């Protein structure tokens, strides 16, 4: 179980996006998505939801969670989060395999 740095709700690790601090060529640290949860370093956890990202940015939670002075690369991280939210909503709207109606599952006696 992990805590989202945006909304502060506890959720399963599989339901959250891990973000890490990465250094660019200039030596500046910024926040980057770690969807495979394998990058080195300290990580922070975030629901892949634009509302949670907004809360985390407004509360300046990434710097505290990562224990570093990081610049939130909001456009890149926001694009990734919005893409995930959109794909999640598409998969909910169109189920891949329709379930049979409950009456079809009953055993006839």
Image (tube, rainbow, N blue to C red):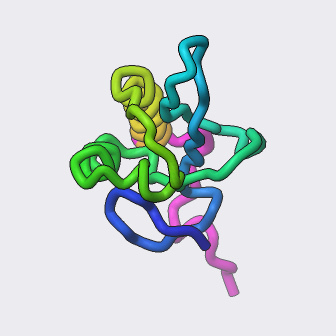
Q: Return the residue nearer the eye: 84 or 72.
A: 72
In this rendering, would 13 be left or right of 49?
A: right
Q: Is residue 18 above or below residue 76?
A: below
Q: Quadrant of the N terminus?
A: bottom right
Rendered location of residue 64, percent (x, y): 43, 57
Q: Residue at x 57, y 68 (%)?
A: 2
Rendered location of residue 74, percent (x, y): 35, 28
Q: Is residue 41 above or below residue 84?
A: below
What is the residue that sits farthest to the top in this orientation? 25
What is the residue that sits farthest to the left in this orientation? 58
Rendered location of residue 65, percent (x, y): 48, 58
Q: Return the residue nearer the eye: 109 or 20.
A: 20
Q: Quadrant of the C terminus?
A: bottom right
Rendered location of residue 94, percent (x, y): 46, 37
Q: Is residue 71 above or below residue 52?
A: above
Q: Is residue 85 above or below residue 10?
A: above
From where the camera sits, is residue 14 visible? yes
The secondary structure that dominates the magenta segment is loop
Bounds of the magenta segment: 93-109
In this rendering, would 59 be left or right of 28?
A: left
What is the residue that sits farthest to the front in this orientation? 27
Q: Residue at x 29, y 44 (%)?
A: 57
């Amino acid at each position: 179980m992990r805590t989202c740095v945006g909304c502060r709700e506890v959720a399963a690790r599989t339901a959250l996006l891990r973000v890490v601090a990465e250094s660019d060529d200039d030596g500046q640290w910024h926040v980057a998505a770690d969807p495979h949860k394998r990058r080195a370093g300290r990580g922070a956890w975030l629901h892949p939801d634009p509302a949670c990202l907004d809360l985390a940015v407004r509360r300046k939670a990434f710097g505290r969670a990562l224990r570093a002075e990081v610049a939130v690369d909001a456009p890149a991280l926001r694009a990734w989060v919005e893409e995930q939210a959109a794909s999640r909503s598409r998969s909910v709207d169109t189920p891949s395999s329709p379930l049979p109606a409950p009456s079809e599952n009953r055993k006839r006696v």
